[in-house]
Image (tube, helix red, strand yellow):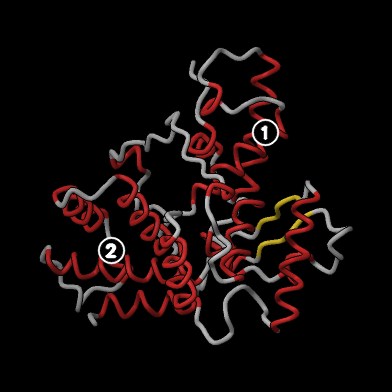
Amino acid sequence: MNKLEYQILQICKRNRDGSQATQSNRRRILAMCTKQLADAGFKVNKINISDLKGRHIDALLNRWRSDGISTGAIKNRLSALRWLAEKVGDEGLVKSNDVLGIEKRQYIKNEDKGVTLSDFDISQLDKNTQLSLRLQAAFGLRRSEALKFQISYALGGYNIQNAEKIRLKASWTKGGRYREVPIATDSQRQLLAEVASFCQANDWQSLIAPNLAYKEQLKCFEAQTSSIGLGNTHGLRHRYAQERYRRLSGMEPPVIAGQRRLTASEREIDHKARMCLTEELGHGRKQITSQYLGSWGR
């Protein structure tokens, strides 16, 4: 481990922002950056974090571009570097993506990626896998959130019949972002009751078997979902977003209905529905909802 990497690791240990997955990914990216700086000829065993300048960022960018790294991956790496710069009080170290010439991602694709759980036979799967899949479908959860789901925390002290929302702990979510998802249907309450009954009967805190670590449970989950042809379960989240949009707006999402020109009042309704979904899905930008819902066009 070189000197620069050691200093960065100490900062990561003192600042545990985000979920465990976010922290691990951040450490990996920053360690990789020190090694790539060494490859570029910088003396990483002699410099301190405070010595990092724009030329170091430029060297990394040039390396990534020559390696053909995708725009999304480059943005993730720059985000980790900005986090580091903020922690050492040098917010200006990494310029904005526009200044660095990083093109904007294209989020809007009118392609329906939604998946309906009833199209698959999940009865042969382990009960906790079944419940995790149904939580994904019913509340738009990511698979990690569904596996780590703890009914007692999610209900926040309310009983299932009176609760108006479920709470998702920051350590369960992508980016360590706490969020809440409304309970809007009787079928959602019935599912929560089944989860509560299963966990109580088996003395489980979450839908991860007590004898397994999260990564081990995830491997079981992936193997089982692949065995029935479901594969990537993110499509369940897409379908939830589409159905939730219908409830919020009274309109079919454009990924289903196709593009058309909205009236002024429809644009306002669409905007409010997308802003609500942005929060419920745990995203920071409204434009990302277009991945799930599509775009109305101009």
Q: Please rate how many residues cluster around mark 2, counting C-alpha atoms within 10 Å: few if below 14, some from 14 to 19, many from 20.
A: some
Q: Which mark is residue 273?
A: 1
Asked where in the image residue 150 lies, by quadrant, the reply is bottom right
Q: Please rate how many residues cluster around mark 1, counting C-alpha atoms within 10 Å: few if below 14, some from 14 to 19, many from 20.
A: many
In percent of width and height, residue 4 lies at: 27, 75
Of residues 90 and 71, the one nearer the viewer is: 71
Give the structural element (helix, strand or loop) at label 2: loop
Q: Residue at x 51, y 83 (%)?
A: 212
Asked where in the image residue 154 lies, by quadrant, the reply is bottom right
In percent of width and height, residue 46 lies at: 20, 77
Relative to 153, is 240 on the left or the right? left
Q: Residue at x 66, y 14 (%)?
A: 264
Q: Which mark is residue 52?
A: 2
Mark 2 residue type: Leu
Please determine whether, in this image, residue 291 is positioned above or below residue 63.
Answer: above
Give the structural element (helix, strand or loop) at label 1: helix
Of residues 7 and 249, the one nearer the viewer is: 249
Disc 2 and disc 1 in contact, CB within 8 angstroms: no
The mark nearer the N terminus, 2 or 1, is 2
Mark 1 residue type: Ala
In percent of width and height, residue 11 lies at: 42, 75
Q: Residue at x 28, y 67 (%)?
A: 51
